[in-house]
Image: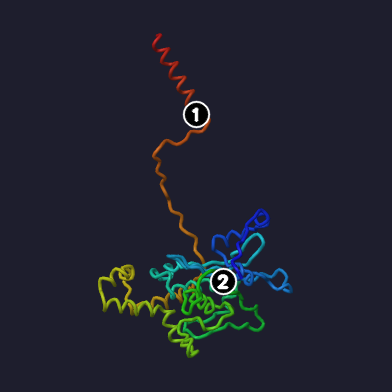
Amino acid sequence: MGFVKVVKNKAYFKRYQVKFKRRRQGKTDYQARRYLVVQDKNKYNTPKHRMIVRFTNKDCVCQVAYARIEGDVIICAAYAHELPRYGVKVGLTNYAAAYCTGLLLARRLLKKFKLDGIYEGVTEADGEEYHVENEEGQPGAFRCYLDVGLARTSTGARLFGALKGAVDGGFNIPHNNKRFPGYDDEEKVFEPEVHKKYIYGGHVADYMRHLQEEDDDVYKRQFSKFIKEGLTPDSLEEMYKKAHQAIRADPEAKAKQKKEVTVKRWNRAKLTMSQRKDRVRQKKESFLRKLQEEDA
């Protein structure tokens, strides 16, 4: 078959329909979103909850949302920039921080719905596969589905750290262990010890030790904030353990303290109409007074 040139004539352009805005921007995978959003007809208007995980250069964002025609409704959110409150002041985008953020989201939402006492989850992370089960005579476990957006779901990806944190926190999220760190695709074997190492920042500690041995200057440059906080490769695990306990003790969001800002002006403030009229009146009075003084 020869080459066929596509003729874009008037009929073509009359029938052309642009794609959705977020598809044009390359922000939303609508095929994946459809499966995550569409609810079974026999469940009527019951919300289908999604656990949304997104990473920026400096933050990890975890949210629980459901879709409505007006737009998505966010019912709870947790951010990695909240972790300094719980003792994790550096490395807010690594696997261990993603686990902490997922755990914070789960505990915060369950407390909001008064389910935190019923579904404790895994109180001490061990890296083992865990699925929450409904308690008899109690409300069912909170069920949601992982929304990864456009991120690549490769084995050991950080977004699965957030998933594991939420599951250990008491969420019922359908998953298996094939994408967690420690899963061997060739031998089809999962090693929980490797996963536990990642949850407690063991991979970061190994890299710190490696740089200390290879090049101390590079280590000081790469981990300058860790050094400033007095963190060593051996103290990371204890830091994350304390953070997990602190999150479970008080997961509620705190309001930001308002900063008192003194606004600097480099030009005169704009006068109102009444102020301008008053200014003119004062000038008139001053001018008339001068004339009277000169005549006298």
* Image quarter (top left, top right, bottom left or bottom right) of the C terminus: top left
Q: Which mark is residue 147?
A: 2
Q: Amino acid at mark 2?
A: Asp
Position of residue 279 relative to residue 19, above or below, is: above
Where is residue 165? Give x, y as percent. 50, 77
* Viewer can see residue 180: yes
Q: Quadrant of the N terminus?
A: bottom right
- Is residue 103 something that shows in the picture? no
Q: Nearer the viewer, residue 254 or 61?
A: 61
Which is more foreground, mark 2 or mark 1? 2
N-term mark: 2 or 1: 2
Task: Determine the residue positioned at 48% across, 88% down.
Answer: 186
Q: Position of residue 200 (x, y in %)?
A: 41, 79
Tell me the residue that label 1 is attached to.
276
Label 2 – label 1 distance at C-alpha: 58 Å
Horizontal side of 218 relative to 144 (left or right) equals left
SS type, badge 2: strand
Coloring applied to the structure? rainbow
Q: Is residue 67 left or right of residue 157?
A: right
Residue 252 position within the rendered picture, expressed as x and y whole percent measured from the top left:
52, 68
Residue at 57% across / 83% down in the picture?
131
Could you classify mark 2 by the number of other residues whose Cα lies within 10 Å: few (under 14), some (14-19), or many (20 or more)?
many
Quarter-of-image position of residue 84: bottom left
Q: Residues within 10 Å of mark 1 (few under 14, many from 20)?
A: few
Type of amino acid under label 1: Arg
